[in-house]
Amino acid sequence: MTSAVNAEISAIHRFGGGPVRLVALFFVSGIAALIYQVCWQRLLFVAFGVDIESVTIIVSSFMLGLGVGALLGGELSDRYPQRALPMFAAIELAIAAFGIVSPNLIHGAGVLAVRSPLPVIASVNFLLLLFPTMLMGATLPILVRHVMRLYQNVGVSIGLLYFANTLGAAFGAALSGMLVLYYFGLAATIYLAAFLNISVSAAVWFGLRARHV
């Protein structure tokens, strides 16, 4: 196990600073993703109520969106490998745009559908969360394809990016649940996540892309 870790670290050093910057940005993207999940769950609970059915619907819609997004992201990255970084930047910007409108969107959907039968509420939740979670799911295969194309190391490509995004997700869940929500409230916390997405998008578009990382 130690030799495998050392080999991975050596590969990172051979790659240089570009992938390290990309991994750091994917860490930030993971923070934003879990801030959204925590906040959207709370907004949906306010709109539709809290019970085992609503929790199941929300978690299932997140998992479905991430899975479908990963498939679509893999397909896009295979078709347009040279455009991986622009696609990633555009996806981060689209996630931010949805995040900014999501408080009003979820509230409005709740007002319209709160008294509807459970299948209708489930469908509304799925439709609300499917688009942004598909975007989130697409980011990993797109970045993996980009790093693999340049550095030809599938293990480091997947391992580092997945590790960074998962670590960022854990940090984002803790940050929102224990600190930011308490002091700033739901809407401001969501806007913070949107700001992180916009920052990642700008850094990729104007920084890493310009260096042809």
Image: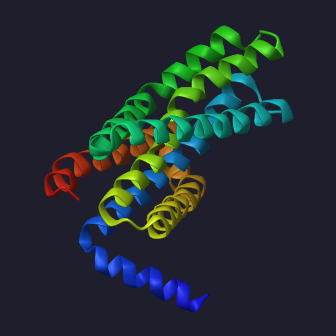
From the top left corner, tell me how far across and down residue 69 is, in percent.
54, 36
Question: Viewed as shown, does residue 46 lie left or right of 37?
Answer: right
Q: Is residue 53 above or below residue 122?
A: below
Q: In this view, does 209 lie above or below 18?
A: above
| Residue at (58% x, 61% y) in the render | 170
Q: Is residue 84 above or below residue 50?
A: below
| Residue at (70% x, 31% y) in the render | 45
As drawn, the residue found furthest toward the left would be 210
Residue 211, quarter of picture:
bottom left
Residue 118, quarter of picture:
top right
44 and 95: which is toward the camera: 95
From the top left corner, tell me how far across and down residue 57 is, in percent.
75, 31
177 and 67: which is toward the camera: 67
25 and 178: which is toward the camera: 25
| Residue at (29% x, 73% y) in the render | 15
Q: In this view, does 111 lie above or below 31?
A: above
Q: In which quarter of the image is the N terminus?
A: bottom right
